[in-house]
Image (cartoon, rainbow, N blue to C red):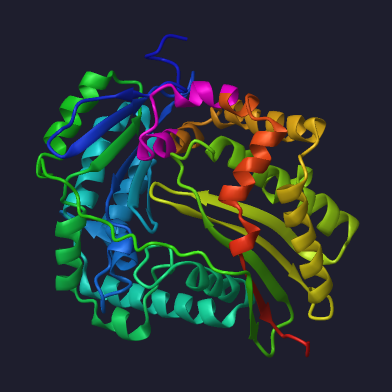
Amino acid sequence: MTSSTDPLRLEYGALANGLSIVRQPPPPGAASFSATYIGPAGWGFDRRGEEGTARIASYLLPSGAGPYDRIELARYLDRAGATLTSECAPESAEVTIWGPSEDWRRLLRLLAEVVLRPRFAADDLERVRRQMAERQLREVSQPASRADRELFRATFPSGHPYRTAGLGTARSVGRVTTETLRNFHHRHYLSGEALLVATVPAHLRSVESVAGHLFSSIPETGGPDLPMPPVRSHRPRRLDVNLRGRSQVEIRIGGNSVARSDPDYPAAFLANEVLGGRAQLSRLFQRVRERGGLVYHASSELEAMRFGGYWSVGAGTGPERYEKVLGMLHHEIQEISRRPVPATELREVRESSIGEIPLALETTAEAHELAVEVAYHRQPPDFLLRWSSLLRTVTPDDLRAAVARAMDERNATTVVAGPLMAR
């Protein structure tokens, strides 16, 4: 493949006003197109007392824009054979459109309408407020959500974007008005440092030309600053949350971690895959879930974002078994921290991870997800081509050194949430 047709090699274009353009060639034979707008509009930017604004704005973007109300927009997408989705994260928000490649100009125009001219209709706002209230209730009453909540609150200080799930409170969400949303939109969607990633057969210059015209209202200015209070180390600690009337206990162990740009990230990525990220090949799956048979699920997560990250180990079990399961989880964390991973185990997990890349190129949507991740983290255009080589250079010693920084059990918090028996 040439660089203009290989979906593993991105093309970084020039700025169109305050918008960076990235083009990814579609997979061979693909008949669809995807484009994602990424803006500095995550919930880490919520103002004090207006927590929940970023999530509400994100939810409402696909609910009407420009000349289309919610029903008209849905019908337009249906006629075009297209889909429109939005997501909100601590650092950013995304809006993605997908549809037939021959209609990429028309669909990109619709994406611009949604991003730049949302309606924020009052009846839609009330609907989203109710959805937020339901999610707030689940966050405090369901063992899994409550365990995650308490882990993040214990790990990150007040004001840190990773401390919450962006749901706000009943009071803060009730304060969000259409004016609040329009002000947030102006500050964070119509600002510099926005990014457009397009997986499209058209040449980069064509994408630059069309996008530059459609998104001309984005100014050539810097984006808003994301507050990042320092995360302080602490001794290992445990938090028990007794939720009566529930049937399952959820366990979380974790803490602060590295950013995606950290040189140790490839080794930390593989460490997480060995521990609990690689489904049936991972230690938590094989030793705790399959061999022990004591849990409903057991896995680990390493979330490395642009400015930092977190790691967590999680499991769900019955109330009569959680202390035993907790001991098994701590044992596996200590094993990967203190003993080199055997070369054969590392090789098996690594090759399984590498094997996912060709599978992701079978559809435009999955290939596009790879491109969005690479572009957001400002990685080189050939990063996906080099990723396999980066993983193959990781040794057992590299992996253990990365664990000490990225999954440090010495600063970990343990959360147990559910119908707890007396200790």
Q: In the rendered image, which quarter contains the C terminus?
A: bottom right
| x 44%, y 48%: residue | 305
Left or right: 404 as drawn, with respect to 54: right
Outermost top residue: 2
Residue 172 % position (x, y): 30, 81
Find residue 399 and report its horizontal and vertical position in percent.
66, 38
Q: Is residue 181 left or right of residue 415?
A: left
Residue 227 is drawn in which quadrant?
Answer: bottom left
Could you tell me residue 1's position as x and y percent? 47, 9
Q: Residue at x 28, y 69 (%)?
A: 53
Residue 259, x across and y down, in percent: 45, 46
Does residue 264 sit above or below 246 in this rendering? above
Q: Residue at x 63, y 47 (%)?
A: 403
Residue 236 occupies quadrant: bottom right
Q: Is residue 299 left or right of residue 85?
A: right
Taken as a whole, is the magenta stretch helix, strand or loop? Answer: helix
Query: Which portion, as a residue range, is magenta?
Result: 371-389
Q: Residue at x 21, y 44 (%)?
A: 112
From the viewer's side, name the closer residue of 21 and 193. Answer: 193
Based on the picture, tell me whether residue 384 belongs to the magenta stretch.
yes
Q: Is residue 356 magenta?
A: no
Using the rendered view, name the quadrant where residue 158 is placed. Answer: bottom left
Q: Is residue 37 left or right of residue 180?
A: right
Q: Quick check: 111 above or below 104?
A: below
Count of picture labels:
0
